[in-house]
């Protein structure tokens, strides 16, 4: 005799499991393919350079400390890019509170008419790991560099993300930047004070704008500005 209750229960369970898993797609900038980066202080592919940033232990990662204290990039085909160092007293391969990953963009390079729209990270889990009730945490910051000094830089996007929002199977999470940006620098760090707050960066999603589309967009913004000014002066 067919047990319809068991069939129904199994079907519902499969549906729940399938909807909870966030499969990471093939990404526009996919660090899982950057095999040449492993073990290096920095590595460049196209117009993107990844750098291992070391910080004074327990003080948080500082953007200017490139390659200090022997930090190196760690790359693998699952987690993408992390940092290999012993700055926190242990030798691991993830981004933790004693280091950061920095991405530099050369927008003058050929085929760089794209905008960054999102980030995939992995290895970020909910409680009992992590230093907060939301689980492990990381931070992403998009920066526009301006002369003459760091005080003139512009923060385009800054967000702390938590493991409670991740797929708990592998800790993967998509961070929507809620816009399209051309940053000079993107930094990934762990703002936590415990070693459990760690993760790796899988890659970036981008949106390509054709030159004609950008021209039309600029004309549209100019027209909106003119209309607003005419209304204000009326």
Image (cartoon, grey):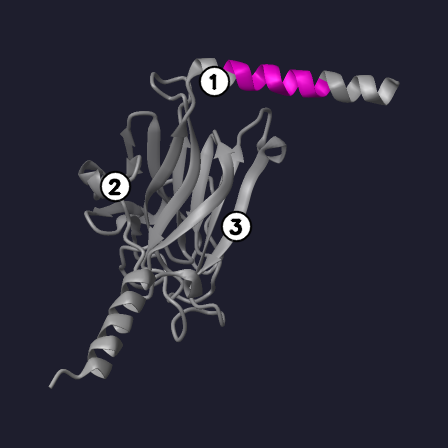
- What residue would you read off at disc 3? 159
Classify 41 as above or below 88.
above
The picture places residue 35, in percent across and down from the top left corner, at 18, 40
Q: Residues within 10 Å of mark 1 (few under 14, many from 20)?
A: few
**Residue at point 62% right, 35% down?**
151
> Of helix, strand and loop, which one carries label 1?
helix
Q: How many marks?
A: 3
The quarter of the picture where residue 19 lies is bottom left
Quarter of the view holding residue 40: top left
Quadrant hosting residue 116: top left
Which residue position holds label 1? 213
Q: Nearer the viewer, mark 3 or mark 1?
A: 1
The answer to whether residue 222 is magenta is yes
Residue to which mark 2 is pinned: 26
Q: Position of residue 51 (x, y in %)?
A: 35, 39
Quadrant containing the N terminus is bottom left
Looking at the image, which residue sits at the far left?
Answer: 1
Which segment is the magenta one? Answer: 215-225
Residue 107 appears left or right of 86: right
Q: Earlier in the sequence, mark 3 or mark 2?
A: 2
Please say if 109 is above or below 101.
above
Name which residue lies at 46% across and 46% down.
176
CA separation, marks 2 and 1? 25 Å
| Few, some or many residues within 10 Å of mark 3 (<14, 14–19, 20+) | few
Residue 222 placed where, x, y %? Answer: 66, 16
Q: CA distance from mark 3 to mark 2?
A: 24 Å
Q: Furthest-front residue in view? A: 1
**Which circle's residue, 3 or 1, is located before the other in the chain?**
3
* Number of the label disc, if any, that sits on residue 32: none
* Residue drawn 36% across the image and 65% down it: 125
Image spot of residue 47 (x, y percent): 34, 25
């Amino acid at each position: 005799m067919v047990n319809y209750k068991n069939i129904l229960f199994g079907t519902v369970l499969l549906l729940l499991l399938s909807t909870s898993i966030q499969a990471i797609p093939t990404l526009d900038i996919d660090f899982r393919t950057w095999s040449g980066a492993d073990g290096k202080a920095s590595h460049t592919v196209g117009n993107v350079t990844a750098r291992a940033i070391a910080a004074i232990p327990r003080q948080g990662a500082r953007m200017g400390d490139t390659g200090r204290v022997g930090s190196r990039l760690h790359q693998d085909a699952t987690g993408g890019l992390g940092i290999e160092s012993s700055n926190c007293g242990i030798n691991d391969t993830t981004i933790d509170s004693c280091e950061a990953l920095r991405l530099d963009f050369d927008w003058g390079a050929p085929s760089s008419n794209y905008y960054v729209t999102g980030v995939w990270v992995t290895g970020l889990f909910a409680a009992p790991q992590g230093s907060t009730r939301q689980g492990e945490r990381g931070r992403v910051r998009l920066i526009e560099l301006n002369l003459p000094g760091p005080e003139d830089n512009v923060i385009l996007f800054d967000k702390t993300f938590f493991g409670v929002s991740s797929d708990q199977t592998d800790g993967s999470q998509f961070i929507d930047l809620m816009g399209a940006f051309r940053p000079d620098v993107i930094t990934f760090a762990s703002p936590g004070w415990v070693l459990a707050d760690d993760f790796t960066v899988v890659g970036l999603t981008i949106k390509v704008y054709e030159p004609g589309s950008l021209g039309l967009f600029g004309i549209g913004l100019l027209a909106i500005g003119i209309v607003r000014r005419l209304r204000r002066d009326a």
